[in-house]
Image (cartoon, coloured by chain):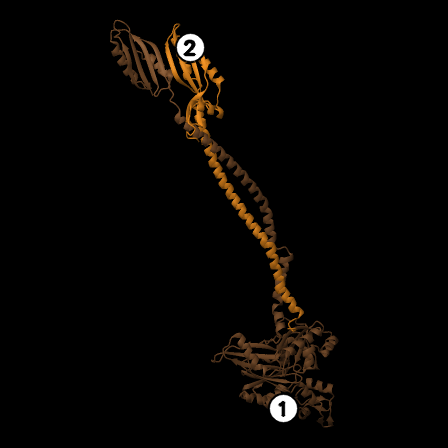
Chain colours: A orange, B brown
Amino acid sequence: MRAWLTPRTVLIVLLLVVAPGAALGRLLFSWVPERVAVTRLNHAVTRQSSTIETTAQEGCRLQQELERLQQALDTDIQRARWLPHRDRDRVFDRLAAVFQTEHVVLELLTLAEPAVYCAANRGNLLACERVTVGCAGDYAALTTCLDGLATLDLPARVRHLTWGRGETGLRLGLELEVAFVPDPALAKSVADAAGLAENADEP
Amino acid sequence: MTQMNLSETWVGVVCDASSATVLVVRGAGPCATLQTQQCLEFDAGALRQHGRLAELEQLVAAQGLRGARVHAAFLGAGMVVEPVQLPPLRGRDERRAIRTRLARYVPGSDLCLAVHAYPKVSKQPGKELLAAVVDATLSRGLLRACRRAGLRVGQVSALAGLVPPPPDCDRAVQLLLTERTTSIQLFTAGRLVSCRDVLLGRRDFVVACQRPILTENGAVTLTAAEAEETCRAVGVPFGREDEIRPGVYAAQLWPTLNPVLQRLRHEVEQTLAHSQVRASDVAVSVAGAPLVPGLAEFLADDLQLAGVALPAEQAEAHFLAGLAGQGQPRVALDLRPPEDRFNDRLTWPALAAGLCALFVIFADSAGPRQAAARRAELHPLAALLDAQVGQVEQQRAEIARRCEQLSSELRRRTALTNVLPPVVPVAGTLKYVFRELPEHFELLDVQLGGQTQPPTLDLRGTYQADVPASVVAAQWARELGTAPFVVGAKVVEVSGSGQSTPAFIAVQAQLK
């Protein structure tokens, strides 16, 4: 054993074993973790890019859906079947403007308390302003008023109409309903007043 | 083996069991010339144990040879060279068999073994080898002694494998002379087939020259230095009649050298007889440093051999080349101790591995640097992408929430739309009614019931004409029923005929 234990042999063993071991250790403790970190980052970047792409596609699809829904809503609003909220002044002003024409005497224009216009269920209903109009005039003037009523920018529905001769000429009596979307408190009160069932298909 | 400069001075140490001849040689190959030579007597036990040769150290210091390359060789007593024929064995068993076969000649269990495989010519299974073995402690001690003396060790070999150039005949006997011994080797077709070491060396010739030489003027006795010079310059004066010294002729040396020559002749003859080789088929070659000139010619003539394979100068150059591990052809029998072989074999790979390792450790090799740079490059990108992912997710969630709201609103509106009461075109209906009134009919009253299902339109008026009122009412109801906004119409009331007095007509239309 002593014969083998020469400085040169020791140096060779050091160079052959210890130095590569140290190099391997350095690789293991520096390069390999770096590579692992880089690989992880690469995977993360790839995954995030993929996520961004997928999410962007999903966003585009949702945006298109949103535009479609918005368009549908806009179309629905353009049909003007109801007012988006309660606006008694607007109702009064528009109707008064229709009947304030020449040769027509507006004798009556009243707005009663709101009532239920229609209801899909208790939580989803439309209220309406109940308007009573009474006027007198000649045939042409009243016909003009009716034309104005037909082209009125107001979702009004004729609930009752009376047309007949009066003492001073022709008389026109109208009961109108103007639908609007009530706030929750008003919706509850009109639903209670109309006696809608509590369990009627709540949304 | 190592390459040697042509002008390099190197040291050859030819060692046997108890003596070593130190040769100082300049040059390599055929140009090698012997500068000086010295014989050292040493105690083999001390050499084994301490690895020190004081005489060698003194010679190196005196000649200024420190740092020179040394080529050591074992020859004669102290080593064994033998051709071996082995049955087929595995590597480890084969070496063990050779070691066992040769170990009986060498004391001790620590042996340096060198093997050279001959090309196989016989049909017998197995291998034909040339094996050499020497006591490893002796070899190790000689190496240490050379290193302690300041010499660089080039190789340790067995000179017995030195193959002489092929003579005209394919058999040759080669005599390798050292100070104390002579190795008699028989070659056949370049193969060593027999090797014997006899205790008769160049020293015996020098001692013989110191005996009284009978001349015409009486007996002449040479001093040791003169005998050494005579042995080197004159050697065996075979066929020479010249005056080698004043009053001393070459032929007069024969009686003093004859006993030695006859002993050597006898040993060679024994070798040939033992090998069953006819002398007339064999050429002779005598090598050694220094040579004994004329010895080969004497043996060739005296034994009636085929001739001399190499002249004296060529034999000396051949010997020196073989000692230096050069020459052609040559059988390499590396007799270094195992640790030296290990060291020599692995020095360069170890240096290369160490340099690579140092490069990896200290030079910040490309792998970690690139990985770190890549990581530094990827970190901000990953962070940016992370933020973008968050933003995109947030936007998507916002859009999804808005979509959900709109969908809910649309569903609500659709539900409301489905339950909306029908809208009656009141103005158009009245205008139609006014326009389509029958003749002689005066409209008194119109009642629109928008809350009924379906909505109804009640028309009342008076009529007076020749046609009966009932007929006019029915006709009117039919016409109303064909109107686009009317589902159906019916006469509700007709009072009177209307021909003499006005009749009252009431018609009800059901609207779409």
B293 sits to left or right of A74: right
Judge whether residue B361 can be spotted in this image: yes
Of all residues shown, which one is farthest toward the top?
Answer: B500
Q: Is residue B484 above or below residue A2?
A: above
Mark 1 → mark 2, Cα distance in angstroms: 170 Å
- Disc 2: which chain? A
Disc marking residue A119: none
Q: Nearer the viewer, residue B469 or B62?
A: B469
Residue type marked 1: Arg
- State the residue position of label 2: A135
**Crowding at mark 2 (Cα within 10 Å: few <14, some 14-19, many 20+):** some
Is B113 placed above or below B244 here?
above
Q: Secondary structure at mark 2?
A: strand
The residue sitting at 58% across, 46% down in the picture is B378
Q: Is residue B197 left or right of residue A101?
A: right
Co-location on one chain, circles 1 and 2: no
Q: Nearer the viewer, residue B87 or B429?
A: B429
